Image (spheres, rainbow, N blue to C red):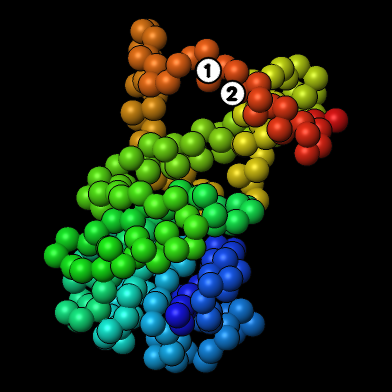
Amino acid sequence: MRVGVVGGGAMGSWLRREFSSVHEVAVFDVDRSRSDVGSLGELVGWAEVVVVAVPFWEVAGVLKSLAPLSSGRLVMDIATFKEGVAEAYRLFPPDALVASVHPLFGPGAPSIRGQRVLVMEVPGRRGAAEAYRFWAELGARVEWGDLERHDFYVSRTIALSYAVGLALARVYAELGEEVFRYGGTSFRYLATFAFSLLRDPNALRYAEKAPLEEFVEALRRGDAPRPLRDPDAAYKAFYEALKAIEAVGDIFK
């Protein structure tokens, strides 16, 4: 199958590598040095499947540009946040297949095999079943999601995690090197995550989506939250995760 990827950034390049094990792949990017073709139209004219892998705030605009070109194609976005996506897909011709997808991992993943991918039906449109099959055939662990509820939950899983991590990174940076002397296991775990976010140029854009008032209100409550998972199992997993972090090198020396 011929697969066109719109966006040659970190995730688009990663997808190109993974798709190439099964499909013919070409990339279009506004940066010509990362593009295989001269225009978006050229890419879509060649492709049977189009995957939009641009920053989430650009996705709706790219989809609108794709709409008049998309007849007979399967088109999917992989945006972290889905603002304007459903509205953009309404512009697509009836014979275009569309679906909204969220790979629940980043370009640091070693392979797509076994990685979780959410596939969401666009209301009133066909294409979700074809999208599910496309990702499953690559070896991903595909699950169904709900486009209408997606951003509510992602703002609390991804965006809030980014906001907390960036805040910790700032606090630690302002304290300086001496902070490492006094950090224990929780610090090492959280600091590893916090510092890793600083390599993502879009980290602040994700963090801006976090429901901070809800987070602060949760901090103010005096009662212990209901555990969604067994705390003893989580504690054991926490220390196993620390072992894995230390196995790749001690960044705190």
* Marker disc for residue 233: 1
* Gap in angstroms between the C-alphas marked 2 and 1: 6 Å
Q: Amino acid at mark 1?
A: Ala
Residue at the right extreme, as displayed: 253
For the point 49% across and 63% down, which residue is it?
138
- 70 w.r.t. 17: above or below: below
Q: Tell me where residue 23 appears, x and y as whole percent.
A: 51, 76
**Residue 249 visible within the image:** yes
Horizontal side of residue 200 vs 92, given as left or right:
right
Which type of secondary structure does the marked residue at label 2 adopt?
A: helix
Which type of secondary structure does the marked residue at label 1 adopt?
A: helix
Which corner quadrant holds the C terminus? top right
- Residue occupied by mark 2: 237
Q: Tell me where residue 231 appears, x and y as whole percent.
A: 48, 14
Disc 2 to disc 1: CB gap under 8 Å? yes
Which corner quadrant holds the N terminus? bottom left
